[in-house]
Amino acid sequence: MDSNRDFTLKQERSLDIFDILTFLWRKKFRIIITAGLLASLGAYYVIHLPKIYVASSILLLSAKDSGLTLPSSLSAITSGEDTRQDTYIEFMRSRQFVQTVVDDLALYNLHEYQQSTDGGYVSEKDYATTKLLNQFSVSKLSNTDMLKITVESLTPSSAAEIANHIGPAFFAYYALINRQKADSKSQWLNDQLNELKNSLSQSEERLLTFLRDNELVNVESQVELAKSEIAGLISQKIHIDRAVAESQGSMVQLATISGGQQDYLQIPAIQNNALIRDLRIRRGQQQLLMEGVTKRYLHKHPKYIAAKAGLEAIDTEFTMLINQLVNGLRSSNETLKARQRQILAQIQETKERHANLGKHSMQISRMQREIESTQHLYEMFLSRLQETEILKDLDDGDDFAIVDSASEPTFPAKPKVVMGIALSVIFSCVFSFGFWLILHLVSDKYTRFKSMLSNLDVPILSMVPRIKQTKANKGKPFALSMHSEGERNYQYFEAIRSLRTGLLVKNNQHKNAVIAVTSIGERDGKSEISTSLADSFSRMEKTLLIDVDLRQPKIGEMFDIDANLPGLTSFLGNKSSFSKCIHAVHSSPLILMPSGPLPPDPLAYISKPRFAAFLHKLRGYYERVVIETPPINTVSDAIAVGKFVDGVIIVCDAEKNEGADLLLALQRVHEAELPLLGVVFNRVKDLRSNMNKRQGLVSRLKRAFGIR
């Protein structure tokens, strides 16, 4: 099955190729005439294009660096041969330089460079400058320091003259630009030097004023002196703090003494006093003397009295000395505290003075750096000014030279007539083929339908041509009228036979005893197709044609059957027997069952189980049953009938219906899962040949291209 499918796909591709070849064969005269006309117009245009002459000259440019370049630190990034050559090219392409060439050669007086009177107003020089800018080019010669100047002109002498003049004019122009740039740079350097000189004087004056206002001579020495002073004061503060701590301890002990002399002796400052120690020794000796006198004498004895008086005198002296020492301790404590506060104040003052000196030192450093930076810039600009003055009079143009002068051209370079005519012929052929192919694809709706159906894998059963009926046969079945008219409707007859043959082939694979014929819309010709197909089958098989279009039936009218005679609705409604509901057709073996009286609800009639059972029984009496149904896009009757048949055929009017309408019909069939046999294109225009002629054309094309 897969091999059969691959064969079908290959066959479709071959047919697509031969369709294009068929189109070429049928439209060959139109394509050839159109291509010939376009090629003739193109050749005429190319031949009558103005002749353009080209002259070239070659210049050798300076390979050394100019003195007016960037500093070395920057030029290392931006310098290079390509950059320098690009600079020269931009100079030559500048409008200002080109205008100097126009003025030197007075090109505005030449007819070629004069403005047309039809255009807007532009001054003569501006117009000539623009024209020359468009007519000359500058290119680099690879791996060299040379440039090629190319000039186009309508006259050979003008092309050579302009090409030879551009080099010397550029040398002079570039030298002028360099001198102007050097003058401008010198002036700028002088201005910068004056500004730096003023800035340097102002910086020095600010430094002197600052030193004078703050009475600063040697800031570094003053800072070191302040550091030494702070260190000495801190050392004194440490000793004072230690003494204050000891004194404060004595004060605490004094505060706890109730008044006894022995308690005062517990204080180290009093206990360690030399006078106290001496008095204590003297008192001990006097007390020993008093104890000896007491043992020997009474209290009224002169020695006893003298010894006691001596002891009392020592105690009085001892008491006075302790009081003096206590008062001395208290006074010393206050003195130490005052000295401590004084040293702290001196330290704070010295620190503030040191901090101010530090700020002054930083300020002086900034001023000095500013002076040094300004001095450095001043010296650098002075050096650059001296270099500029030295290089100012050097002529950089001495390094330029003309390597090859332009000679007057003999033959025009443009246009290339042979190439232009060849391209015109090729373009004309391609355009003519594309134009007629696009026009054919746009106008040939059948081709678009065919492509869409091929993508959806829906077969095209037949193409039925449009035929004109005579007044006598108008409204009659096509099947009967075409037999009476003989060869006149041979194409229609062949299309119906092709449809019948296709269905018979499908019948060998799947039984297609009952076939429903529907259409996309009203008046698409489904009645003509169904009657013609049924008539064609009836000449081979026992065939029944049923009109199930219970909304607008036409088959009975086409065969001159009275509308009041019984038909399908009469049989389904059990009003008439089957034999009374069918009718024979004159001059045809076809059996016909018309619609009968129209019911109020047609869909309810064909949805009954009796209708399905009726179609099932017909398979035993007739070899082929053809059923005409209403349009599938208008009502759902065709979908209801399609549930009970073996195959459905959709009739599409190739001229009236659109692709969206056909796609909607196919979508409804697909959603309802109906057994679709294919599509019949009806009323196809310009179907000029039958299948034999088409096959003959295909055979000739195969032989022409060597395809077997």
Image (spheres, grey):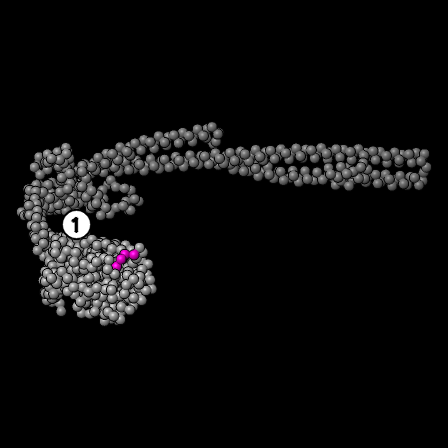
Q: Give the quadrant of residue 228.
A: top right
Rendered-image quadrant of the N terminus:
bottom left
Decide: is 540 above or below 225.
Answer: below
Decide: is 37 above or below 625.
Answer: above
Looking at the rendered structure, the secondary structure element under dot 1 is loop
| Picture residue at 45% right of the left edge, 34% below the top | 363
Q: Position of residue 543 (x, y in %)?
A: 21, 67
Tell me which amino acid carries mark 1: Leu
Q: Position of residue 540 (x, y in %)?
A: 18, 69
Res. 317 visible in picture: yes
Q: Position of residue 85 (x, y in %)?
A: 20, 45
- The residue stretch that appears in magenta: 595-599
Residue that mark 1 sits on: 141
| Picture residue at 14% right of the left edge, 37% below the top | 129
Magenta stretch: includes residue 681:
no
Q: Position of residue 532 (x, y in %)?
A: 18, 62
Q: Give the quadrant of residue 180.
A: top left
Rendered-image quadrant of the C terminus:
bottom left
Residue nearer the viewer, 256 or 215: 256
